[in-house]
Image (spheres, helix red, strand yellow):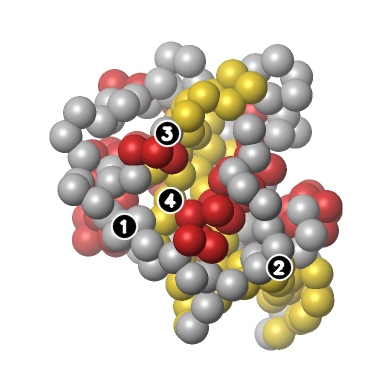
Amino acid sequence: MCSSSMSDDDSLVHDAALSPMRPSDPPAEYPRELERWVDLPGGERMFLRPIVPEDVARIGNAFEHADIDTIRRRFFTAAPPTDRAHLEYLARVDYVRRLALVAMDADGDSVGIGRYETTDDGRAEVAIVVAPAWRRLGVATVLLQALEAPAISHGIEVFHALYLPDNTSVEKLLIGLGYGDRRVVDGIIELVKPLADAGTIAE
């Protein structure tokens, strides 16, 4: 499920104190090689790293301040689960079948998050959320492309994304990145992208 924005509430993006920029004691399976700085086309810089359990505070903060439209576009409901168990599920991944990448600015504040979760053999659903001040700067593109190489290395062959018909910005983004085979089921649109010929992580 994809969304192109976070809340317009400024408190959402001032969350650097909630978890470390570079975790000092991550899980044993944490893929440190996925940490990197990214220079965006407009000159902005952001730091990308895999999610860690300590990021549950960032996720909780995001849920607390997210606007209804963002929640609706991301979860197709106005009231997704926000209990501690659900937040910890989102923050705890195995980095193989489930991976999430957190994007932060130079101060360590969250600017976006992208994730994939396997749904069946060789397929995984992708989702992205980007802070309003960082929209249309290339953050979503970087996040989606950065998920591809690790997915391929773990045997995932196809990404698919689900979104609401009014989320035209996400549709344009996905099509531009090679997603296609558009299907509509119960009012939800799905686009897919084969990963067999996908390139390496975009710099």
Residue 149 visible to an observer of this rendering: yes
- Mark 1 residue type: Val
Q: Within 10 Å of the Cα at label 3, are there few (<14), some (14-19), or many (20+) other Cα atoms?
A: some
User: Which image quadrant for residue 108?
Assistant: top left
Marks 1 and 4, how far apart in space? 7 Å
Look at discs 2 and 1 and give the one toward the viewer.
Answer: 2
Residue 124 appears at what percent x and percent y?
53, 70
Marks 2 and 1, how far apart in space? 23 Å
Looking at the picture, does residue 31 appear above or below residue 11?
A: below
Marks 3 and 1, how far apart in space? 16 Å
Marks 2 and 3, how far apart in space? 24 Å
- Mark 2 residue type: Lys
User: On the image, numbered disc 4 is attached to which residue?
Assistant: 100
Between residue 25 and residue 81, name the one nearer to us.
Answer: 25
Viewed as shown, does residue 43 lie left or right of 119? right
- Mark 4 residue type: Ala
Mark 1 vs 4: CB contact within 8 A: yes
SS at circle 2: strand
Between residue 172 and residue 188, name the one nearer to us.
Answer: 172
- Mark 3 residue type: Glu
Between residue 49 and residue 129, name the one nearer to us.
Answer: 49
Marked residue nearer the N-terminal end (2 or 3): 3
SS at circle 1: loop
Marks 4 and 2, how far apart in space? 18 Å
Marks 4 and 3, how far apart in space? 12 Å
Residue ID at (41%, 56%): 99
Marked residue nearer the N-terminal end (4 or 2): 4
User: On the image, numbered disc 2 is attached to which residue?
Assistant: 193
Instruction: In the rendered structure, find residue 93 and report the number of the disc placed on it.
Output: 1
Residue 162 visible to an observer of this rendering: no
User: On the image, numbered disc 3 is attached to which residue?
Assistant: 35
